[in-house]
Amino acid sequence: GLSARKGLTVLIGEAGAGKTTLIGAALEEWRSAGHLVAHLSNPTLTRGEFFEYLAAAFDLPAAGSSKVRFLSEFTALVTRRHEQGLITGLVIDEAQSLSDELLEEVRLLVNIETATEKLFQVLLVGQPELGARLNDPGLRQIKQRIALRCTLATLDVRQVAAYIAGRIHIAGGVAAQVFTREAVMTVHQHSGGIPRVISVICDNALLAGFAASVRPVTSPVVRGVCEGFDIQPSLISADG
């Protein structure tokens, strides 16, 4: 969305699905290439605080002194960088918490453009509640400007197995010697394929298995951990 200069992109995923991790990896890649992309992780701001954040992030005069001056210099900045072939953008995490007032300001910023291209790229990242927010008739103007909308899905059982195996490999282990196949399936059933929950279950299952001298970790050990954390099986099929 940002590299293709779409203007406004929306990424939606469940809590713990890996949105922030994905964004962090992408930001590292973009910034190393000279692109300037700010990352707002807590958008519960007033309008004044929002522009104060933008001013600091893009090294511009504080918006409090003059919003007209700020917008003028901001437009000059994004235009200059665009001519240099560089991306200027903003990633707003937890965007479901944005006020209607700030969503309107985002819409106006996205409107900075040439006759053919958007000069400022915005990525709204949020939980499914963000999609519901954008269906509000009062926000139809910003919804109409969404050029790309993506959903970060949860992992199916094969992906859960690959995720666990990958993490164990990075730590220097062999997955088949750490978790049984049935244990991995139980992790999938209780986590719903959400990476954050998978990690919590597996980490504590390793501790429980070590304490009980059980290796590899078995399905009963995983179920015991899930009971302790009150993590109930998700309503998903064995195939995800």
Image: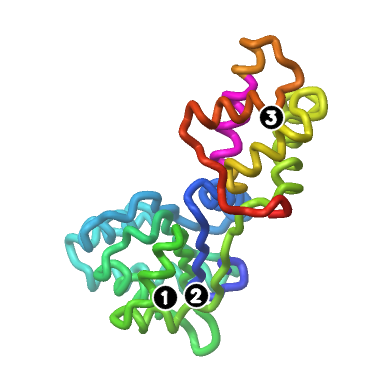
- Binning the other alpha carbons within 10 Å of mark 2 as few (below 14), some (14 to 19) or many (20 upward) gives many
Residue highlighted by disc 3: 219
Point out the tag, 3 or 2, that comes first from the N-terminus.
2
x, y percentage for residue 52?
A: 26, 56
Would you say the magenta stretch is mainly helix, strand or loop?
helix
Judged by depth in the image, the label closer to the viewer, 1 or 3, is 3
Residue 28 seen in this snapshot = no
Q: At 44% across and 59% down in the image, what residue appears?
A: 126
What's the colour scheme? Answer: rainbow
Of residues 41 and 134, the one nearer the viewer is 134
Dot 2 corresponds to which residue? 7
Q: CA distance from mark 3 to mark 2?
A: 47 Å
Q: Is residue 73 left or right of residue 193?
A: left
The residue tagged 1 is: 110
Helix, strand or loop status at disc 1 = helix
Q: Residue at x 42, y 79 (%)?
A: 143
Residue contact between numbered discs 3 and 2, judged by CB atoms under 8 Å:
no
Q: Residues within 10 Å of mark 1 (few under 14, many from 20)?
A: many
Examine the structure image and report whether residue 46 is included in the region drawn in magenta.
no
At numbered mark 3, what does the secondary structure look like: helix, strand or loop? helix
Q: CA distance from mark 1 to mark 3?
A: 50 Å
- Where are the magenta residues, as a range? 196-206
Please state which of residues 96 and 159 is positioned toward the viewer in this rendering. Answer: 159
Residue 24 percent across, percent down from the top left: 55, 47
